[in-house]
Amino acid sequence: MKKLKTSWNGIKGYVASALCFGAVIGLFLNGVLSMSDRMDREGEETLRSAIARASVQCYAIEGRYPPSVEYLEENYGIKIDRKRFNVFYEGFASNVMPEITVFSSAEE
């Protein structure tokens, strides 16, 4: 009887250790995913801001807003990682600031 009680205590110790280890791994993975999401959001905002600044610079130099994001890439040094971000650039007229929207791509 004493041997059975001792082995049961040992099993409880292993189970408790496994649960603690699982909890630590879960917390670590949650932190990594949270950090990744935050970095994606910051990347979106940084890219949107860079495109807006380049658009204003184009307007100041050329007297019109750029017709497309590709124009900014070719002439104003904007670099877009198309695997990470989708950029929507909608210009109403050449003298009206375009609407710029940046989303993280789903295919990573």
Image (cartoon, rainbow, N blue to C red):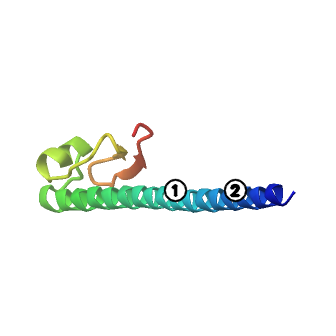
Q: Element under label 2?
A: helix
Gap in angstroms between the C-alphas marked 1 and 2: 21 Å
Q: Residue drawn 52% across and 61% down?
A: 28
Point out residue 82 in the picture as x, y percentages from the top left corner. Answer: 30, 41
Q: Residue drawn 32% across and 54% down?
A: 96
State the quadrant of the N terminus. bottom right
Q: Is residue 48 left or right of residue 15?
A: left
Give the answer, above or below, for where 27 lies relative to 87: below
Q: Is residue 63 left or right of residue 29?
A: left
Q: Element under label 1?
A: helix
Q: Residue drawn 45% across and 39% down?
A: 106
Which of label 1 and label 2 is nearer to you?
2
Q: Which mark is residue 15?
A: 2
Point out residue 102 in the picture as x, y percentages from the top left corner. Answer: 39, 50
Q: Is residue 25 left or right of residue 36?
A: right
Residue at mark 1:
29
Look at the image and tell me whether residue 67 can be seen. Answer: no
Give the answer, above or below, for where 29 lies relative to 70: below
Q: Is residue 61 left or right of residue 54?
A: left
Q: Residue drawn 28% across and 55% down?
A: 51
- Looking at the rendered structure, the kind of residue marked 2 is Val
Label 1: how many residues lie within 10 Å, few (<14), some (14-19) or many (20+)?
few
Point out residue 22 in the picture as x, y percentages from the top left corner. Answer: 61, 56
Task: Answer with mark 1 or mark 2, whichever residue precedes in sequence.
Answer: 2
